Image (cartoon, grey):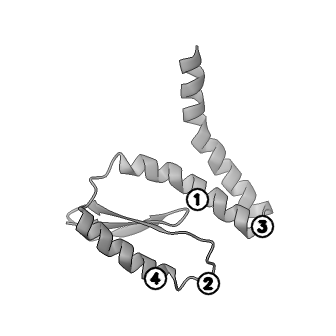
Amino acid sequence: MAGFFYNLGKMLAPKLRKGKWVWKSLTADTDEQILAEREVGLDIVASMLGQLSMGDKRQTLFIKTVGAKLSKRISNKKIKFSFFVYNDASPNAFAVPGGFVFVSSS
């Protein structure tokens, strides 16, 4: 029976965090909005890391270095960014809520 409740919580938690994000974006102060958005992004990133083939350490270090330089230019220093490199034949980049940026590398 404990496994049932564990699986139920695992299934519902991302949906609850999305609802919290929507609610906080309408009612909360900026700090709480940023935190709620980051929590939703962590759910998405966890799912994506299981689906994507990640790039090598050298490429990832380069993208993180460039990303850190760009992040310093953001006016709201409370927003944290995380950068990931994934393998894909076509050039692409995208971001998910919470400051998570994915860049493709062939």
Kindly identify which residue carries mark 1.
38
Across and down, in percent, residue 16 comes to 65, 43
> In percent of the image, x 44 and y 48: which residue is there?
46
- Bin the neighbour count of mark 4 within 10 Å (Cα to Cα): few under 14, some 14-19, many 20 and up: few
Across and down, in percent, residue 34 comes to 65, 64
Kindly identify which residue carries mark 2.
75
C-beta proximity under 8 Å, tags 1 and 4: no
Q: Is 85 placed left or right of 72 in the picture? A: left
**Circle nearer the N terminus (1, 4):** 1
Kindly identify which residue carries mark 3.
29
Q: Quadrant of residue 97?
A: bottom right
Q: Is residue 24 above or below residue 93?
A: above
C-beta proximity under 8 Å, tags 3 and 1: no
Kindly identify which residue carries mark 4.
70
C-beta proximity under 8 Å, tags 2 and 1: no
Q: Is residue 14 above or below residue 58?
A: above
> In percent of the image, x 53 and y 86: which residue is there?
73
What amino acid is found at the position of numbered circle 1 in the picture? Arg
Q: CA distance from mark 1 to mark 4?
A: 19 Å
Residue closer to the observer: 90 or 33 = 33
